Amino acid sequence: MNPMYRVAIVDDDDGVRQSLSSLLRALGHEVRTFASAEAFLASLEERPDCLLTDIQMPQMNGDVLQQELLARGYAFPMIFMSAYPTEAIRERVMARGAIAFLSKPVDAEAISRCLALALE
């Protein structure tokens, strides 16, 4: 059995949060979900081992969330997802150290592979 890791999911879509949460729990991880980047930033007293976040969200998007986390000194693995991927955003988040940039809908196998890479 894999060790349990703390994984945070940030996505404004409730269905995406629920499905990813179910998948990650089935893989043996502890999961916390957040409907916004702001809610996630307010909870950082307990740092996750990995972050899965959407890019397109109201108020603060995933790109800006990554910038803010790095500015605050947080360097945990980050996996990005987007229903509207662009090469410019992919290049930007990857250049800042993202583990992956996935197009939605994301399949379970892709998430599992990315998490294994992030948590090794």
Image (cartoon, rainbow, N blue to C red):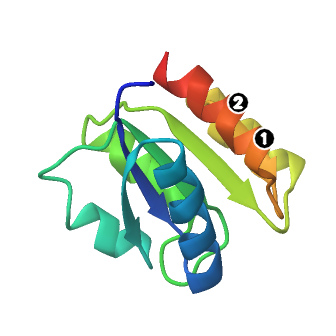
In the visual, does 30 lie left or right of 54?
A: left
List x then y, in percent, for residue 34: 39, 72
Amino acid type, label 1 = Glu
| Label 2 neighbour load within 10 Å: few <14, some 14-19, many 20+ | few
Query: Which residue is drawn at the image coordinates 41% and 44% (left, top)?
Result: 29
Query: Which residue is drawn at the image coordinates 75% and 49% (left, top)?
Result: 108
In the visual, does 8 lie left or right of 47?
A: right
For disc 2, the marked residue is 113
Would you say residue 10 is visible in this rendering? yes
List x then y, in percent, for residue 51: 46, 47
Would you say residue 98 is visible in this rendering? no
Q: Quadrant of residue 112?
A: top right
Give the distance between the C-alpha atoms of the residues marked 1 and 2, in whole angstroms. Answer: 6 Å
In the visual, does 14 lie left or right of 84?
A: left
List x then y, in percent, for residue 94: 67, 33
For disc 1, the marked residue is 109
Residues tagged 1 and 2 counted as in contact (Cβ below 8 A): yes
- Given residues 20 and 10, the one toward you in this image is 20
2 w.r.t. 12: above or below: above
60 w.r.t. 70: above or below: below
| Label 1 neighbour load within 10 Å: few <14, some 14-19, many 20+ | few
12 w.r.t. 117: above or below: below
List x then y, in percent, for residue 89: 75, 50
Query: Which residue is drawn at the image coordinates 59% and 25% (left, top)?
Result: 116
Local SS, label 1: helix
Amino acid type, label 2 = Arg
Local SS, label 2: helix
